[in-house]
Amino acid sequence: MIPGLNAIVPMACVTAAAIAAMTAEAFRSPGERMPIAGLGLVGLAGAALATVALWNQNASSFGVVTADNFGLFVTMVLVVVGVLSVAISGPTIERQGLPAGEYYALLLFSVAGMMLMATATDLVVIFLALEVLSLAVYVLTGIRRSAATGAEAALKYFLLGSFSSAFFLYGIAFTYGLTGSTRLDRIGSLLAAQSMAPTPLLWLSVGLLLVGFAFKVSAVPFHMWTPDAYEGAPPAVTGFMSTGVKAAAFAAFARVFLSAFEPLRGDWTPVLWAIAASTMILGTVVGMAQSNVKRMLAYSSIAHGGYLLLALMAGNEIGKGAILFYLLAYAVTNLGAFGVIALLDTAERPNDQVRDYAGLWNTHPGLAALMTIFLLSLGGFPPMAGFVAKWYVFSAAVAAGYNGLAIIGVLTSVVSVFFYLRIVVMMYMTPADAPAVFPAVPRLAGAALVVSAILVFYLGILPARLLDLAAASIGTIF
């Protein structure tokens, strides 16, 4: 590695793979099959190796990108998200006739932006990374150009995302005007040294930054884009953006608010309390009324964002480690669920209604079993990863004194079991109206789902090592 550039090597590997995918698409003859997905896997493997090599090195590039263990842990989570997303995307690309080079290039560019967002230590660089990942995801949402729902979803996502970016940029501008810097360490030092009470303008800057982050993590009331975007995008894209975008956004969220704005904790905590409570409640209650599986998982994603906000608010040793562990557990679980949806998707119909899963155990017992594992993990059943993740989040909230918020979290988690088990009942106990014909499961996609299921059980049964690693990693941002 080159000294001074070490911190950007993981994202450079992914970016190089994205450029290679674009080049391969440009030179591919019509109808010619090329292993473009393999290029993405090679780039992600290079990023994983670079991440391991950088561990405990605390490398820095250009003074605004720091490969500390916190950023590297999130980078590894994003590598897992990228690999699983590439693996489950093949069937969708073939059945929908999507341009493979364009699809994989956009996905990889988005992963590179996520990695930059997780390791950036400057507000302007965080904003640039946010835009890089967002623009790619906007296009991926509407990549099925013939689908009206995809175009509508992409337009809504783009317009609302533009507004949130404007709020975020205004927050950066006000912060710079008040502190004279956009570097997180300098902002934190200045705020900690101030003996005076925060000014209204400082509250405004923190509020504007909070709006930008809340939009990306689908927190109420900035969640409006989520169900439409999740429903309109191809299932593989939905799984990718529901996990990767959330992981990158929460990484930057934690770095900014738990380090730079930690001195103002007493001011932003009450606001975050209300946002977390309303996010958990709305995501659960509205999710119960959904008949579309993708929209149901969209509201599930909103509720899970509320649980992560709960860990962020706690800010104690348990909560800090729980953030990273929850992101990993949620990533492998949710990607697995959307992977099953992607495999059941056909060119004629999406098969994403709850009723479409009736009798799946009789036609595809393997997919039914995998979907059951993922849904039970999302619901928080032991010994799945979701149970351990929620246990540590609620334990952190109780230890921090947020008993009321912990009770809301437990109750909403129990209620959410209803819409997860509804699909399980449909698969095993409800006969299909007519014999359903689902496509065969490709080997790579099937292997990715099996790996996801194994990780769900591993994180649920043997979480101690990962939890310790997560807690030690997030400590490097302070």
Image (spheres, grey):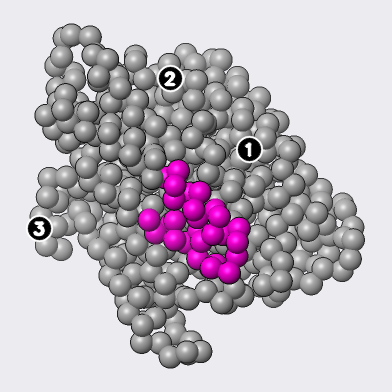
Task: Give the mark, 1 or 2, whose residue is nearer the N terminus.
Answer: 2
Quarter of image, res 325: top left
Eyeballing the image, is 178 above or below 417? above
Residue of label 1: 380
Task: Using the image as rendered, state which of residue 309 and residue 229 is in the foreground.
Answer: 229
Q: Which residues are magenta?
A: 135-161
Q: Is 65 one of the magenta-colored residues?
A: no
Task: Say what amino acid the circle numbered 1 marks.
Answer: Gly
Residue of label 3: 3
Eyeballing the image, is 390 above or below 149? above
Circle 1/circle 2 CB separation < 8 Å:
no
Eyeballing the image, is 30 above or below 379? below
Is any part of residue 297 visible from this angle? Answer: yes
Is 132 left or right of 393, judged from the image as shown? Answer: left
Is 179 left or right of 242, judged from the image as shown? Answer: left
Q: Secondary structure at mark 1?
A: loop
- Locate the C terminus and report the quarter of the image it occupies: top left
**Image coordinates for residue 430, horizontal then vertical, percent:** 88, 53
Task: Say what amino acid the circle numbered 3 marks.
Answer: Pro
Task: Using the image as rendered, state which of residue 72 and residue 172 is in the foreground.
Answer: 172
Residue of label 2: 271
